[in-house]
Image (cartoon, rainbow, N blue to C red):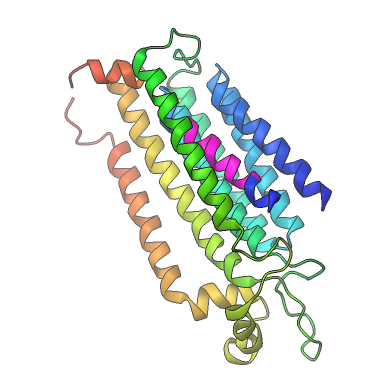
Amino acid sequence: MIIFLSCIILFLIGLYAIVTKRNLIKIVIGFAFIEYAINLLFALIGFRRGMLAPIITQVDMPHKFVDPIPQALVLTAIVIALGTTALMLSVVLRIYNRYKTFDIAEIRKLKG
Amino acid sequence: MIELYLFLVFMIIAAFVATEIKDLLAAVISLGAVGFSVAIMFILVQAPDLAIVQIVVEVVTIVIFVAVIFRTTHVDETIGKKLTSSHVLSIVLYAFFALIFFIAMVRALQELPAFGNATMKVASEYIRLGLPQTGGANLVADVILDFRALDTLGEATVLFTSVIGVIALMRSVGRKK
């Protein structure tokens, strides 16, 4: 329970960066923190104490594995996180080339 | 499992440093510290596939961040400025909604099985049928490539869409000056 709530605190730090920071790079970093927190929460929910990684090594043995489904879902999500981060950073780079600032308050004042 | 708690405390401190520090390059280094801690935690919770992918993705993410910062600036001018009224309003609203969200998550996470006791209702079928039906020994690979292959197709679509977006944004040929 406490370990799940620690992931939620990491999520809230990312949300803090997105909502209150005025620097675009810090906002992208906040999105990255939210992605890490959710991926970690999924992997922790699927964990079982004393069990092994879900890879079959002996066929006739009883299978004592951690849950493979959250791991499969998170494997997809990690790669998508890379794609969204790269897209956000290219948008940020375009904005900087036009306005010469990362400050979203300054960007709001200027006209394109 | 004390090391999991130590890594989580380290990650929360590094995340807070990354949001508050003035040098953007240092913020990206803190982001990398959090990402590699996530990779180590994946190994500790018996998820080696996730740890491998996380390390690769983390390295690429940091390289992209550093490339962007080298082409622009590495000083965050907004840190240390005087707080405007809209900034104070955003902090107050954030604190309010963070409190509501935290209480809701406390109540929601109580419904889940406790840490270390996953129920595995769906997964027991996949574990039983994984090797006979797909022939793959790695059950995570069985799930993403066979049982839920359409999910993986959608993931590849999203990834290629984002790559097309990056190429369209970063091109220099044919752009109006």
Q: Answer whether residue B114 is magenta in the image.
A: no
Dominant secondary-structure state across the stretch colored magenta: helix
| In this view, A14 is above or below A78 | above
Using the rendered image of the protein, determine whether residue B64 is visible from the camera's viewpoint.
Answer: no
Residue depicted at x 41% and y 35%? A89
Q: Quadrant of residue B68?
A: top left
User: Which residues are drawn in magenta?
Assistant: A6-17
Residue B63 screen position, x and y as percent = 54, 36
Q: Answer whether residue A9 is magenta in the image.
A: yes
Residue depicted at x 78% and y 80%? A57
Disc tally is: 0
Residue A102 screen position, x and y as percent = 38, 21
| In this view, B64 is above or below B91 | below
The foreground one among B16 and B168 is B16
Residue depicted at x 37% and y 58%? B158
Using the rendered image of the protein, determine whether residue B65 is visible from the camera's viewpoint.
Answer: yes
| In this view, B75 is above or below B38 | above
The foreground one among B65 and A74 is A74
| In this view, B145 is above or below B115 | below
| Residue ranking furthest to the top | B82
Judge from the rendering whether residue B109 lies leftward or rightward of residue A66; answer left or right: left
Q: Quadrant of residue B83?
A: top left
Residue A14 screen position, x and y as percent = 51, 37
Residue depicted at x 81% and y 47%? B3
Quadrant containing the C terminus of chain B is top left
